[in-house]
Amino acid sequence: KNEVEQSPQNLTAQEGEFITINCSYSVGISALHWLQQHPGGGIVSLFMLSSGKKKHGRLIATINIQEKHSSLHITASHPRDSAVYICAVRGGSNYKLTFGKGTLLTVNP
Amino acid sequence: EAGVTQSPTHLIKTRGQQATLRCSPISGHTSVYWYQQALGLGLQFLLWYDEGEERNRGNFPPRFSGRQFPNYSSELNVNALELEDSALYLCASSFGTVDEQYFGPGTRLTVT
């Protein structure tokens, strides 16, 4: 079993829909990252959080430390949001990132 | 402010050769991380350098090595290349060990 599990693996939505991507982890962490990777490979860090909730524009990330679970929400989705979204957790003692396999999001116009 | 830069963008090598990949962190960042993204395997942690020292490495053989220079830029060396080393290699940097990591555009290594 992977230390970081994401669901769903693939997600197709219509423009304007509300999107939720989930991440569960099984180890103790010091922080959780949400990353966005567009075709071609470039990675953008969307959020780093260790508790509560963060919001940036149409993106919202939440984390529940007790339940070892995080969600990434996209409101009013747009075709330009189409990308792979990756959850990564940072260990408590060694600072390395462990990644989920990613969620491929396709938003159709 | 310039982001993390990596060179070259693409690199084609044959099996058995050596590859050298380079990374320049964001100005002021002292930590550099290397990750491998092989097809179908997702991102995997390779190496972490901080203040010129190797602080941690992932489950990769010793032919994956690197170093960090006094200006905090870093080099990743892969010796005795194998076909399965073909991957996107990403570098990230952070100001401190607990800070957010910023990723470079990656170097795509193809081993034939």
Image (spheres, coloured by chain):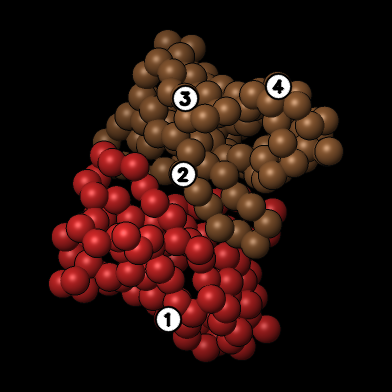
Chain colours: A brown, B red
Q: Is there a contact, CB below 8 Å, between mark 3 and mark 2?
A: no
Mark with earlier residue (3, 2) = 2
Report, in whole angstroms, how far the alpha carbon at label 1 lies from the one at label 2. 25 Å
| Three-letter code for the amino acid on which mark 2 is drawn | Ser
Residue A98, above or below B77: above
Which residue lies under the disc numbered 2? A45
Task: Tell me the subunit letter for badge 3.
Answer: A
Mark with earlier residue (2, 4) = 4
Which residue lies under the disc numbered 3? A55
Instruction: Report if residue A104 is visible in the image.
Output: no
- The crowding category of the residue bearing disc 3, from other C-alpha atoms within 10 Å (few below 14, some 14 to 19, many at least 20), is some
Task: Tell me the subunit letter for badge 4.
Answer: A
Q: Is A89 displayed left or right of B24 in the figure?
A: right
**Residue depicted at 65% across the width and 62% down the height:** A40
Q: Position of residue B20 (x, y in %)?
A: 42, 81
Which residue lies under the disc numbered 1? B20
**Residue depicted at 43% across the width and 18% down the height:** A53
